[in-house]
Amino acid sequence: MRCFSRSELEHHVMREADPSGSPVSAHMEAHLKECDACRKELDRIRSEQRMFENAFYSDGPDEGFTAGVMAALEGAEIEYSGSAARHTTRRLKPIAQWRRAAVAACALVLLGGAGWYAALQSGMELLGKQEQQPSITAGVQKKIDTADRERIGKLLNDPNYEWSWTSRAALLDSFGLVFYPDISLHDDKSGYRFEVMGILADASQIVILTRTTDGNGQPVSRAFPYELPFVLTGPDGREGAVHARTDQSAVNGMEAYVYVMNQPLPDRIEFSGEIEGINRMDRELDREEIVETEPLVFDYSLDLQTAKKYAAFSAVDKTYKAPDGLNIEVNRLIRTPGTIRVDLHTIASGEIRDRSPGDLGSQIEFQFRIEDQDGRVVGRYGSTSNYFNAETVLTHYDKNTGEGEWTLVYPMAETNGLSGDGQQPYKFILESYQTALEGREEITFDPSDLKRNPVVLEDEGDRFELTGAEIDKRDGIPTVYLDYRSEYVNGRDGIWEAVDENGQFYYPDPTAGDEVRFEILYMEKLPEQLTLRRTMVPKIYNDVGWSVDLPANALSLPTESGE
């Protein structure tokens, strides 16, 4: 019996996390009972997912909220990929990606930062009021009338506006920033049909809304999960926009391919592609397969002059030099009708670079706010509750040089109130940032002796006191539980590993709720000796307080006359 790939094991963990979704494969369950290698990899994936859910997004939702959201957004996924020529994209772990997609699907308003549930709650409330669209708080106002809403809802097969991109399409349509290319390609061989229903194009990003159906007219999700068939080029033939993520709708069988615009913005971008195969999931066999098609070729030209008209471009070019060796340069802000985009450049040196090699170096979260000249906060952006969450994040990190490029696109829904014309000076304030560092501390102990002699692990200011251990089962799987008390100054949990006296590795999963304990699956008895270490620390640097004065008009949109 073959071993399963990491991708297949990740899908397995996703199904475990969503009881309302498709059942866990019996074939895989049988294999996991026999295969130590697959069980070890599965434990590592579970641990990573727990870290990415908790480490950067420590504020949690009310009891039952996550289950309700996941049930409502069954089937939603997000995939990050990028162009090898210029960028590598942020590689968050699949379940963290899925949860970000769920927030995006509800919030219009979404990703780089998040007490996700807070933004999601406010976004659900906003989208639930069908006559209340995100408003533009500075510059020209646009009204979305009932007829336009009905037209776009019908076009996108989403009359109730349950998908965030339906609301965004209605908003941008009122500014003339939506293209309707009428691309509908049918493959006689397979019966599959591919359609481009609309293209949203402002100065920050391009969003391609597509629908793919099989020979029976049923929607196909994950039509292009890995190699995308789309090419976006500028007048000089160079890449005009870089793929950042893919959203899939749980309500209308559509997909949104989000591309970040390269700067400076050209007057025109050519959109083309050639499809020779469509990906589909075989639910019965629990696997993905490629349906070959005849070449389906398409092209379309996007005129971006209106996008440039309704945008404010502000060069900043100021650098914060952190004492730990991380320099953060804010290059530019771009304000559009629906978003505010921040372009950053980072250079890591010293300890922070040494302890953030490879992928860890690309896992930085930023928190910032914008204040008016009276010190009033008009917008918070970042990765905690009550902040706007980035709906798109694109990164490139060079582990050889320690340099990173960042594009963060945040929703520009109604805030505490930019000035009516947006023309007064504002202040951009970097509040804090957090990054993933390799852990250095470990502790060795006898689990059976913890109740009599608790042990303490201190790491980067966080403190963990282990107070007890017991052997039990979880869903029939032998499991050791380690009780602990904790005090955090950083993000919660991190990634952990444990090694017993025989050199066997395990991947503890720190649980929370009524009981705070480490859960170590497939450990059949209490070891005589156990070494516990946190291999990844979600380190938080607070109270940065660095600020930049933004130029006048940095957040203002032009009027109808173009002023």
Image (cartoon, grey):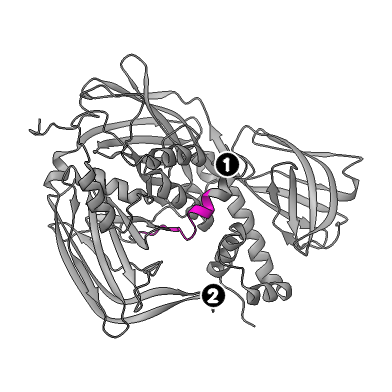
Foreground: 181 or 478? 181
Q: Which residue is mark 2?
A: 286
Residue 419 appears in the figure:
yes
Quarter of the image with the C terminus in it = top left
Please say whether residue 112 is one of the residues in the magenta stretch. no
Percent of width and height locating residue 430: 41, 29
| Mark 1 crowdedness (10 Å alpha carbons): few <14, some 14-19, many ≥20 | many
- Label of residue 538 in the image: 1
| Kind of element beneath mark 2 | loop
For badge 1, the amino acid type reads Pro
Foreground: 525 or 206? 206
Percent of width and height locating residue 21: 55, 62
Q: Quadrant of residue 62?
A: top right
Q: Residue furthest top?
A: 374
Q: Is residue 359 above or below residue 185?
A: above
For badge 2, the amino acid type reads Asp
Q: Which residues, given as a range, are shown in magenta?
A: 69-82
| Mark 2 crowdedness (10 Å alpha carbons): few <14, some 14-19, many ≥20 | some
Q: Is residue 456 above or below residue 398?
A: above
